[in-house]
Image: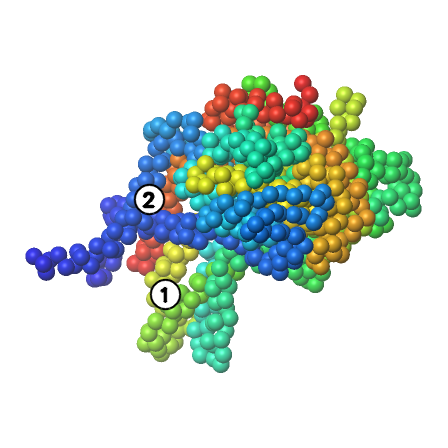
């Protein structure tokens, strides 16, 4: 290139040409990277981050007596209640391969523990795909919407159910459930034993059943009983606030905590920045991170008497209950550990289990993990009680959000839906003590969802004692824990599980996060969220969502969670 | 005839690959941006909507703010990486004992997968248990209280910038060092004979001759930084509020979290056009500087 050429000005055409070349280059790079990333992330190499715990599986296998003989096949469990189930003479689905997709981590452990037994009894070879917690709904939706049919069984949180059920992507399991009642080889899943709240809110849509509950998430209030029930501390507290903490908190029973009174005062009292004599660093902690803070706001919102929409699908989140809920959420942040605005499940859990916070609201798995010395520094120091609330019309209204949860369902693209249902049935059936094994195990995050789980604390103890890894867990507070679970489920406040909920939640969580960070005041934040909700509702279809909302409320009423 | 077809025969696999992996998805995504497709919403009739997605995008304040934040991010990180990379490259452009070892050690952050970097820094920046607060608060006493590196709206974006600078400064250093090594010794020798000082050598010889390498390094990093997503996802998930929500992350949310595939496609094309224009302007500015 000559110096003359170098010195020449670039013409408009050259500039456009250069821009076009660069644009093409960027697109090529982007698309290649995108496709590569997609393939690496899903199709070619599905994330399988959970390692198989072989040793544990063998230990469990030792404990369950399974007799499968050629002449008189029976599956007998040694645990109470003694249940003899007649399996098929030979595995009925020999050679069938099924893929189960769920969030990677502790909640997939039962699949790994039982993989071999499922192959032995049902003949099903189970391929377990674990995807990151935050990607679960997207991955499943991608599989459904593209019709790829990679997954036969899916584990998902019911807040995505609106899109999955409404989209027609799941198999109606009514016939299988009914068949199990009369055909002994198909085992009765004991549908009515699933707690009414969970089977109504989680599993049914438009009067049909599409899923089986796998994780009975709800909120409970946990506190440090060694501190909050301590007589000396209670005297000091009374001197400052005029009442004892024990006047408003009872472990295993119904507390009388108000978010805007006792909750704030207890949080202040136990925060060293406000009370240097506090034996603990922080009064409380919150699940305040973007993407999950809506669940803690939901609890406050429900307690303040709020409901998400009116009958015409106009959002009500920015009305007085919503603002009251968010203002209280903002007010409590100063009593939380640093970084709380970024807290997700793990950070919030650790703030309490590692001994930094005095009282929190969180999912039930904290209750069992808190008594496990391998995960907790506060074994035997936990108290369990009803979540706080707000006074509405002079009455204390305490509602804990029935946040997240998990269900098992069969994809409509599965080539073996019956076999897929049978795997679900196995995991929640008699051989697994109707899933008590999984919800009782502190290594999982699965929570009680059957009446059976509540009524058989001896099975929990048996489970803990069955393995050296869980043998150290403290048994002492289990009755209180189960009693608290029962009360909190009765006081549950449901999520808005209609189509579009992930997008509605995003609009909400971003504004809650902004309000908590002090970027905008609660009213303005919720006004913005409500305005975006209206856009979303109108785009997806107001009439379509209205029907879903009305159907949802029928389920809430049936579960006794909505009184209108 | 056979001879004239031979080159095409060898080109055929590459053409097919480019068509399948680049051109077809590109055209398809353009098509998507003109319809109203939403994943998993079979009740919504798919139809041609013209420029509606683009009009929605340019009136979407959250997207526009995310775009501005992306520009801020790109401007800060690329500038810092360039300055630091140049300083390191100049320091390493001489022979000393252990030079290769130093270069290897300095390039380690660049060799780590971004996801791993995200997790490592997530731990480092943890407000309660991370070593960063121990260093800043307990050891250096630069702050009285623990800093919420990823949970404070005023700090979070800068935390992500810090991590990006940590990871990609070595890349800048490597490119610039290669450029420095390719500059011949003769211009320096002539300038020294004329009595030029160190800064004069740098200003009038090193910098002009290094410009092709600078251009390459800046272009790669600017294009790459515009796509920032992984660190945001891992460290802050766009929060608190929308304090760290950048354009790519916002597009991801709309497309994969909210299933609005067509709208996300339109947002992608807007981002692409903006970044292409920005890069063209940058090339022109640098070329103009070279001519002078």
Is residue A21 placed above or below A200 in the rendered structure?
Answer: below
* Front residue of this view, candidates A152 and B256: A152
Q: Residue sitting at 46 percent across and 51 percent down? A: A46
Q: Is residue B251 left or right of residue A340?
A: left
Q: Position of residue A514 (x, y in %)?
A: 61, 38
Chain identifier of the residue bearing label 2 in the image: B
Q: Quadrant of the N terminus of chain B?
A: bottom left
Is residue A85 placed above or below B147 in the rendered structure?
Answer: above
Disc 1 to disc 2: CB gap under 8 Å: no
* Front residue of this view, candidates A295 and B82: A295
Q: Position of residue A389 (x, y in %)?
A: 75, 31
Look at mark 1 in the image and give the residue it sits on.
Answer: B210
Q: Are marks 1 and 2 on the same chain?
A: yes
Determine crowd level at label 2: few under 14, some 14-19, many 20+ residues with C-alpha closer than 10 A.
some
Does residue A351 appear anywhere in the picture? Answer: no
Which quadrant holds residue A433?
top right
* Front residue of this view, candidates B282 and A496: A496
* Front residue of this view, candidates A116 and A557: A116
Q: Quadrant of the C terminus of chain B?
A: bottom left
Q: Is residue A535 left or right of residue B153?
A: left
Q: Secondary structure at mark 2?
A: helix
Look at mark 2 in the image and give the residue it sits on.
Answer: B25
Whichever of callouts 1 and 2 sits on the residue coming sooner in the sequence is 2
Which quadrant holds residue B136?
bottom right
Does residue B93 appear anywhere in the picture? Answer: yes
Q: Residue sitting at 54 percent across and 25 percent down? A: A206
Q: CA distance from mark 1 to mark 2?
A: 37 Å
Q: Secondary structure at mark 1?
A: helix
């Amino acid at each position: 290139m000559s110096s003359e050429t170098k010195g020449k000005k670039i013409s408009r055409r050259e500039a456009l040409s250069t821009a076009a070349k660069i644009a093409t280059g960027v697109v090529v790079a982007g698309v290649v990277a995108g496709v590569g990333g997609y393939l690496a992330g899903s199709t070619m190499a599905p994330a399988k981050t959970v390692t198989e715990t072989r040793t544990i599986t063998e230990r469990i296998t030792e404990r369950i007596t399974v007799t499968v003989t050629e002449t008189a096949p029976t599956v007998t469990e040694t645990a109470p209640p003694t249940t003899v189930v007649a399996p098929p003479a030979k595995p009925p689905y020999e050679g069938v391969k099924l893929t189960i997709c769920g969030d990677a981590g502790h909640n997939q452990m039962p699949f790994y523990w039982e993989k071999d037994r499922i192959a032995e009894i049902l003949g099903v070879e189970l391929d377990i795909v674990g995807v990151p917690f935050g990607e679960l709904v997207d991955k499943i939706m991608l599989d459904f919407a593209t019709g790829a049919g990679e997954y036969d069984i899916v584990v998902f949180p019911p807040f995505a159910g609106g899109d999955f059920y409404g989209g027609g992507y799941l198999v109606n399991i009514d016939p299988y459930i009914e068949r199990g009642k009369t055909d002994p080889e198909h085992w009765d899943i004991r549908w009515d034993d699933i707690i009414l709240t969970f089977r109504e809110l989680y599993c049914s849509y438009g009067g049909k059943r599409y899923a089986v509950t796998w994780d009975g998430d709800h909120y409970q209030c946990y506190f440090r009983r060694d501190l909050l029930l301590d007589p000396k501390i209670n005297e000091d507290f009374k001197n400052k606030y005029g009442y004892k903490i024990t006047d408003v908190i009872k472990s295993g029973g119904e507390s009388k905590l108000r978010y805007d009174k006792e909750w704030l005062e207890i949080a202040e009292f136990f925060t060293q920045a406000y009370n240097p004599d506090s034996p603990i660093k922080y009064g409380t902690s919150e699940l305040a991170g973007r993407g999950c803070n809506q669940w803690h706001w939901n609890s406050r919102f429900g307690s303040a008497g709020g409901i998400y929409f009116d009958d015409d699908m106009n959002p009500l989140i920015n009305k007085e209950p919503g603002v009251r809920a968010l203002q209280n959420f903002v007010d409590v942040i100063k009593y939380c550990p640093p970084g709380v605005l970024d807290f997700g499940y793990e950070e919030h859990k650790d703030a309490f289990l590692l001994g930094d916070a005095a009282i929190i609201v969180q999912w039930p798995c904290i209750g069992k993990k808190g008594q496990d010395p391998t995960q907790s520094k506060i074994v035997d120091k936990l108290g369990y009680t009803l979540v706080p609330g707000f006074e509405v019309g002079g009455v204390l209204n305490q509602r804990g959000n029935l946040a997240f949860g998990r269900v098992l369902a069969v994809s409509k693209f599965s080539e073996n839906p019956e076999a897929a249902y049978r795997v679900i049935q196995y995991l929640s059936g008699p051989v697994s003590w109707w899933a008590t094994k999984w919800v009782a195990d502190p290594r999982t995050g699965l929570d009680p969802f059957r009446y059976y789980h509540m009524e058989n604390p001896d099975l929990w103890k048996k489970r803990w004692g069955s393995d050296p890894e869980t043998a150290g867990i403290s048994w002492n507070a289990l009755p209180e824990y189960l009693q608290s679970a029962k009360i909190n489920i009765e006081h549950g406040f449901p999520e808005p599980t209609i189509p579009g909920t992930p997008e509605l939640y995003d609009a909400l969580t971003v504004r809650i996060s902004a309000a908590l960070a002090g970027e905008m005041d609660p009213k303005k934040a919720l006004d913005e969220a409500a305005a975006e909700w209206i856009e979303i509702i109108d785009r997806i279809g107001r009439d379509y969502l209205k029907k879903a909302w009305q159907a949802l409320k029928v389920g809430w009423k049936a579960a006794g969670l909505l009184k209108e | 005839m056979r001879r004239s077809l031979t080159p095409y025969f060898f080109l055929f696999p590459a053409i097919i690959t480019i068509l399948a992996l680049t051109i077809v998805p590109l055209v398809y995504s353009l098509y998507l941006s003109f319809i109203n497709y939403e994943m998993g919403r079979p009740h919504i009739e798919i139809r041609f909507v013209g420029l509606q997605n683009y009009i929605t995008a340019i009136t979407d304040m959250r997207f526009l703010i995310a775009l501005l934040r992306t520009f801020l991010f790109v401007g800060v990180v690329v500038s810092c990486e360039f300055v630091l990379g140049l300083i390191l490259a100049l320091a390493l452009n001489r022979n000393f004992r252990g030079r290769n070892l130093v270069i290897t050690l300095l390039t380690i952050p660049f060799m780590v997968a971004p996801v791993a970097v995200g997790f490592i820094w997530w731990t480092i920046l943890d407000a309660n248990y991370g070593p960063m607060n121990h260093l800043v608060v307990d050891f250096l006493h630069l702050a009285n209280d623990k800093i919420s590196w990823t949970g404070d709206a005023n700090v979070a974006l800068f935390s992500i910038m810090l991590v990006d600078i940590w990871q990609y400064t070595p890349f800048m250093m490597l490119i610039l060092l290669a450029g420095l090594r390719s500059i011949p010794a003769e211009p320096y020798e002539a300038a020294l004979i004329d009595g030029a000082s160190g800064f004069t050598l740098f200003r009038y010889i090193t910098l002009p001759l290094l410009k092709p390498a600078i251009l390459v390094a800046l272009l790669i990093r600017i294009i790459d930084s515009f796509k920032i997503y992984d660190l945001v996802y891992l460290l802050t998930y766009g929060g608190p509020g929308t304090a760290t929500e950048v354009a790519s992350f916002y597009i991801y949310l709309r497309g994969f979290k909210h299933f609005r595939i067509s709208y996300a496609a339109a947002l992608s094309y807007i981002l692409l056009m903006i970044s292409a224009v920005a890069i063209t302007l940058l090339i022109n500015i640098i070329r103009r500087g070279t001519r002078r």
